[in-house]
């Protein structure tokens, strides 16, 4: 049997585990002080006090710095070509955001080669990893043709198993909505399904209504894809309640919520994935995370990295915005960006540091996770391990 290299990281001043078994002493994050972690192969083998750490092949001294689970970014749109900085500049000088800009990216994405798209996704995934993201979900949605949606997902699949078919992003210009829904649920779905785990719909004014979303999600389910939903980003609507009715694991954006929407989220257990980088980048109102948390709703944070409404890959920025603008505590925000994102992908092997979980962790150049919000915009990631391997020098 091949020996699996083991690594012990000692001298961790503060370790956030998210381990439910440690919440009684360590609070929401299952904090452990003066801690150590042993990584063996791709998994966490041991967690405990530094003084009790077993020997390992490789030893790393954290020097009193903090360690947190790798961020789990459960909502991104990385497969695209082109740049929409001019649209951003216009929006910042007074023009409101609409979904129309998506079509600009579609034209450029269709014109790009597979190699160009792959190189672009590789750059963005590396950018994310350098900032502590070790698990990322990637959507299609800038192809909007059978060929381009399938190849977008094939590109994404080179980087993650968490791929999402978003043919139902917007209706392409010159196409009748009914015809396009037939395409999405027919030939496009058939071509995309082999490369996808999830199916998503932008359920919004100007995109797809509740009935269309229901039909698209049902077709995806019949093809073995699990459902996700963009909903209630730009205005109030029925998307969030549809997600709860269907028992979807998560519904994303959740900016405009009625009392009935909040009650439905709380009773269904559907996770509300909040994307504060979007509101930062569009000057829309921020979601009221405090209202959701106080109602017992489970919350995740994700970047929504995309070329139009939010071109950031920084989960640390999302944490800082969630604390400052959405009234989450630093602990709630970190939990939402790690264990919450994992739950939104129906994963229990990432976002948590406990024996048996994936050895995805981040060494911060700070004594506490609180510095992620306390020092916004400062690059605090000093080291990253992904599946037990150093992905960034510590």
Image: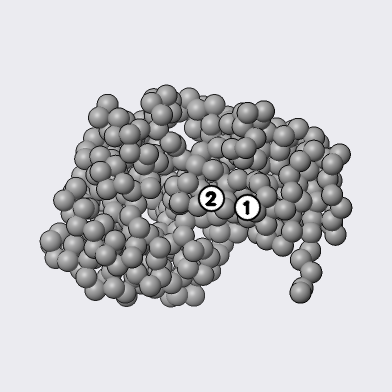
For residue 358, what is the image quadrant? bottom right
Q: Is the C-beta separation of discs 1 and 2 under 8 Å?
A: yes
Q: Find numbered disc 1 in the image and state the secondary structure of the residue it sits on.
A: loop
User: On screen, 106 above or below 111?
Assistant: above
Answer few, some or many: residues within 10 Å of disc 1's Cα (few below 14, many 20 plus, some between 14 and 19). some
Q: What's the CA distance linking mark 1 and mark 2?
A: 8 Å
Q: Earlier in the sequence, mark 1 or mark 2?
A: 2
Image point (24%, 73%), residue name: 187
Residue 137 in the figure: left or right of residue 48? left
Could you say where residue 149 lies in the image, as x and y percent from the top left?
A: 34, 68
Q: Nearer the viewer, residue 344 or 234?
A: 344
Q: Find numbered disc 2 in the image and state the secondary structure of the residue it sits on.
A: loop
Reading the image, the residue beneath label 2 is 348
Q: Nearer the viewer, residue 47 or 241?
A: 47
Reading the image, the residue beneath label 1 is 357
Residue 185 in the figure: left or right of residue 321? left
User: On screen, 131 above or below 30?
Assistant: below
Image point (77%, 73%), residue name: 2
Let me know if residue 394 appears in the view: no
Could you say where residue 94 lies in the image, as x and y percent from the top left?
A: 33, 36
Could you say where residue 269 lies in the image, as x and y percent from the top left?
A: 37, 39
């Amino acid at each position: 049997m091949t020996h699996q290299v083991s690594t012990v990281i000692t001298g961790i001043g503060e370790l956030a585990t998210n381990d439910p078994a440690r919440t009684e002493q360590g609070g929401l994050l299952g904090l452990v002080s003066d801690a150590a972690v042993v990584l063996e192969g791709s998994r966490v083998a041991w967690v405990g006090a530094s003084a009790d750490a077993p020997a390992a092949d490789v030893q790393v001294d954290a020097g009193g710095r903090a360690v947190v689970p790798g961020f789990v970014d459960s909502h991104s749109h990385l497969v695209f070509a082109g740049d929409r900085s001019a649209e951003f500049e216009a929006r910042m000088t007074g023009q409101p955001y609409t979904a129309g800009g998506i079509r600009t990216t579609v034209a450029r994405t269709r014109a790009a080669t597979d190699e160009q798209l792959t190189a672009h996704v590789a750059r963005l995934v590396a950018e994310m990893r350098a900032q502590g993201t070790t698990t990322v979900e990637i959507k299609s949605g800038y192809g909007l043709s059978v060929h381009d949606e399938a190849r977008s997902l094939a590109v994404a699949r080179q980087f993650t198993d968490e791929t999402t078919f978003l043919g139902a992003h917007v209706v392409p210009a010159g196409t009748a909505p009914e015809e396009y829904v037939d395409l999405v649920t027919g030939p496009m779905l058939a071509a995309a399904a082999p490369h996808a785990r999830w199916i998503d719909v932008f359920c919004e004014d100007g995109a797809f209504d509740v009935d269309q979303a229901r039909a698209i999600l049902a077709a995806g389910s019949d093809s073995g894809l699990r459902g996700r939903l963009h909903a209630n980003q730009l205005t109030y609507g029925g998307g969030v309640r549809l997600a709860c009715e269907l028992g979807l694991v998560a519904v994303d954006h959740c900016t405009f919520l009625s009392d009935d929407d909040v009650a439905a989220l709380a009773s269904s257990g559907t996770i509300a994935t909040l994307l504060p980088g979007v509101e930062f980048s569009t000057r829309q109102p921020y979601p009221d995370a405090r209202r959701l948390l106080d109602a017992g709703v489970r919350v995740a944070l994700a970047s929504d990295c995309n070329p139009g409404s939010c071109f950031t890959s920084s989960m640390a920025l999302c944490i800082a915005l969630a604390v400052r603008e959405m009234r989450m505590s630093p602990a709630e925000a970190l939990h939402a960006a790690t264990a919450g994102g994992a739950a939104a992908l129906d994963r229990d092997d990432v976002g948590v540091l406990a024996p048996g979980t994936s050895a995805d962790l981040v060494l911060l150049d700070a004594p506490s996770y609180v510095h992620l919000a306390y020092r916004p915009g400062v690059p605090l990631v000093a080291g990253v391990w992904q599946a037990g391997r150093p992905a960034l020098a510590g």
